[in-house]
Image (cartoon, rainbow, N blue to C red):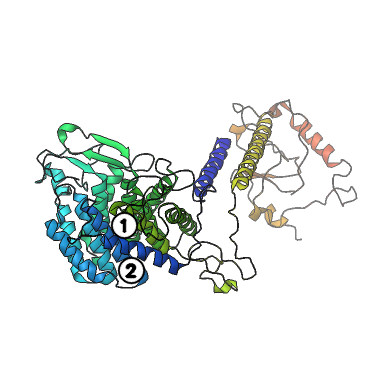
């Protein structure tokens, strides 16, 4: 049993080690370091945003996109002002929101609930930036519209929701559908989409953060629980949708896309920042690792290869986590380098120099035609580049924001005497191999020691034992244990202790009038008054003691007493006789 436990402990150690190494940036990632200054990054992002704003029509929409894409741009305009602590786009946004709501009152479209939630998200970000109540009201309007298409606890119990015709399934996989948001406003469409549910989660969390209103926080938690319970697959990516129609038996689309996973991550980032819940933080960490290592939407070089807006949601979510999480330096550095890979790919492969027009995918070829969707996907990465902290050199360790010489970004600060050239990325392969070999060697040694101990214990257990069925016999001068308190008594006091003859039921008494020593039992232990050293074993091992005459025992005792060297330090003279009551 013990070897099994030790093996299990070592396995757990290696698993934990592997989990920690998952946060090590891949050596295959292409250009993870951003070398441009923050001012340059701000200039590049501003130019890309200005290009997009210039392409808006008089109604505040792009001529080549759906209703949701301008809402994405509005959020990016507000985010740029927040990052630069400015108000460049404040007045433009006020006008754009009025135009957007005139097209779709209450931000409710006939196509998708998620489309309208883009404006709720943008309004919530604008309120965070400008603290103007009009933006907060717009965000609440969008949230209230989506709330009608999100299953509440009361609706889950009743099995009906007024915006849909079908009866609700009481549960799927043993869990209710509370927190699920429908994608379509069509009364016959009963599909709860992860995209709509994720957007409702994000907007609810932003409103909870802005207002401290428990209603919004409860809604965010319900949405997160719905996605985690029903749409998060074992690979920690988010599947597409689930039917709430009781007659469709929880039909699912298990396709997992970067868009769905990205919006869920952003919602968890905000929710974890509000609640500080360790379970949410642990879930978030595992999903981030799955997102960044998923080869379905990125190559081994780390560059996102999707031809959709998935890169927008993933980078936006990771940038939010990078900014909000200031405690885990290894996670921040991991995210920083991943965003750096995307940023450099956008700058080098997604645009022609000086055009300020960006396309997808970010692996090339270069784009020459403007697309509102493609442009806003790239702008998210350009904004994420602004959020990354520069590596500032330090003249002495005490100048560091932390006592261990590591700044908030998690990267060690270079000293003034080191070269400004970036050091090559450390390859952890050697450390991993060495750790595994060392651990296995330790395992072998540990198991060998355990087996040796068990073998020795087994050998000791093979020594002859007294027959438990025979009467127990107490014999004078048998090695016994003496309690510390009793052994410290002077001989005179020992002599005055009461004597306890051995019970006849345990064999014949071994005491006699010719015995030179008294035998006492105290708390089940046998004590000798002489306090002599342990006697050698009785030579008559194989003969039952009750068959040996008392005279023979006395003779043997006297022979032992007269043996040479028996009384060390006494010149072979017998010890003096002591009598009870004699003064010392």
Q: Is residue 239 left or right of residue 475?
A: left
* Number of numbered markers: 2
Q: Position of residue 311 (x, y in %)?
A: 36, 50
Q: Quadrant of residue 7?
A: top right
Q: Position of residue 325 (x, y in %)?
A: 41, 61
Q: Secondary structure at mark 1?
A: helix
Q: Position of residue 550 (x, y in %)?
A: 74, 32
Q: Is residue 514 left or right of residue 282?
A: right
The answer to whether the residue labelled 2 contacts the one labelled 1, judged by CB atoms less than 8 Å apart, is no
Residue 82 is marked as 2
Residue 228 is marked as none
User: Does residue 203 appear in the picture of this structure?
Assistant: no
Q: Which residue, as the protein is rendered here, is positioned at the far right?
A: 571
User: Does residue 422 appear in the picture of this structure?
Assistant: yes
Using the image as rendered, state which of residue 515 and residue 323 is in the foreground. Answer: 323
Q: Quadrant of residue 399?
A: bottom right
Q: Dot 2: few (<14), some (14–19), or many (≥20) neighbours within 10 Å?
A: some
Query: Which residue: 15% across, 49% down?
Result: 149
Query: Which residue: 41% across, 59% down?
Result: 322
Using the image as rendered, state which of residue 491 and residue 504 is in the foreground. Answer: 491
Q: Is residue 547 left or right of residue 406?
A: right
For disc 1, the marked residue is 271
């Amino acid at each position: 049993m013990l070897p099994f436990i030790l093996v299990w402990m070592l396995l757990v150690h290696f698993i934990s080690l592997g989990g920690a190494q998952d946060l090590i940036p891949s050596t295959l990632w292409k250009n993870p370091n951003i070398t441009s200054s923050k001012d340059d990054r701000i200039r590049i992002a501003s130019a890309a945003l200005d290009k997009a704003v210039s392409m808006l029509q008089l109604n505040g929409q792009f001529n080549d996109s759906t209703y949701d894409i301008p809402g994405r741009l509005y959020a990016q305009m507000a985010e740029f002002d927040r990052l630069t602590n400015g108000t460049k786009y404040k007045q433009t946004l006020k006008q754009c929101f009025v135009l957007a709501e005139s097209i779709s009152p209450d931000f409710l479209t006939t196509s998708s609930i998620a489309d309208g939630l883009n404006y709720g998200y943008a309004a919530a970000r604008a309120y965070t930036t400008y603290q103007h109540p009009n933006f907060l009201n717009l965000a609440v309007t969008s949230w209230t519209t989506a709330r009608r298409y999100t299953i509440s606890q009361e609706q889950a119990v009743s099995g009906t929701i007024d915006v849909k015709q079908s009866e609700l399934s009481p549960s799927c996989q043993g869990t209710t559908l509370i927190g699920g948001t429908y994608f379509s406003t069509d009364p016959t469409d009963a599909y709860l989409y992860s995209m709509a549910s994720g957007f409702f989660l994000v907007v609810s969390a932003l409103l909870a953060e802005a207002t401290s209103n428990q209603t919004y926080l409860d809604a965010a938690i319900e949405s997160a629980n719905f996605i985690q319970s029903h749409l998060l697959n074992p690979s920690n990516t988010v599947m597409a949708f689930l039917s709430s129609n009781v007659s469709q038996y929880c039909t699912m689309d298990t396709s997992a896309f970067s868009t769905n996973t990205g919006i869920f991550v952003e919602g968890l980032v905000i929710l974890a920042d509000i609640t500080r819940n360790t379970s949410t933080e642990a879930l978030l960490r595992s999903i981030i690792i799955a997102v960044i290592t998923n080869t379905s939407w990125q190559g081994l070089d780390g560059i996102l290869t999707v031809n959709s807006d998935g890169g927008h949601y993933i980078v936006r979510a990771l940038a939010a986590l990078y900014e909000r999480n200031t405690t885990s330096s290894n996670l921040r550095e991991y995210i920083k380098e991943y965003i750096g890979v995307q940023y450099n790919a956008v700058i080098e492969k997604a645009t022609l120099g000086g055009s300020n027009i960006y396309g997808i995918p970010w692996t090339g070829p270069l784009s020459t035609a403007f697309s509102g969707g493609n442009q806003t996907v790239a702008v998210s990465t350009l904004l994420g580049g602004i959020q990354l902290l520069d590596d500032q050199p330090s003249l002495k360790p005490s100048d560091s924001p932390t006592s261990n010489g590591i700044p908030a970004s998690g990267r060690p600060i270079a000293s003034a005497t080191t070269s400004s050239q970036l050091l090559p990325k450390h390859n952890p392969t050697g450390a991993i191999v060495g750790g595994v070999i060392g651990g296995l060697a330790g395992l072998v040694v540990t198991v060998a020691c355990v087996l040796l101990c068990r073998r020795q214990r087994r050998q000791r257990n093979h020594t002859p034992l007294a027959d438990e069925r025979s009467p127990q016999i107490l014999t004078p001068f048998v090695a016994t244990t003496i309690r510390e308190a009793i052994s410290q008594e002077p001989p005179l006091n020992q002599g005055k202790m009461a004597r306890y003859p051995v019970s006849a039921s345990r064999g014949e008494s071994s005491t006699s009038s010719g015995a030179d020593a008294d035998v006492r039992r105290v708390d089940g232990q046998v004590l000798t008054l002489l306090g002599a050293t342990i006697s050698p074993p009785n030579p008559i091992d194989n003969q039952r003691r009750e068959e040996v005459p008392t005279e023979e025992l006395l003779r043997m005792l006297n022979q032992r007493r007269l043996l040479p060297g028996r009384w060390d330090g006494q010149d072979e003279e017998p010890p003096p006789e002591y009598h009870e009551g004699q003064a010392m």
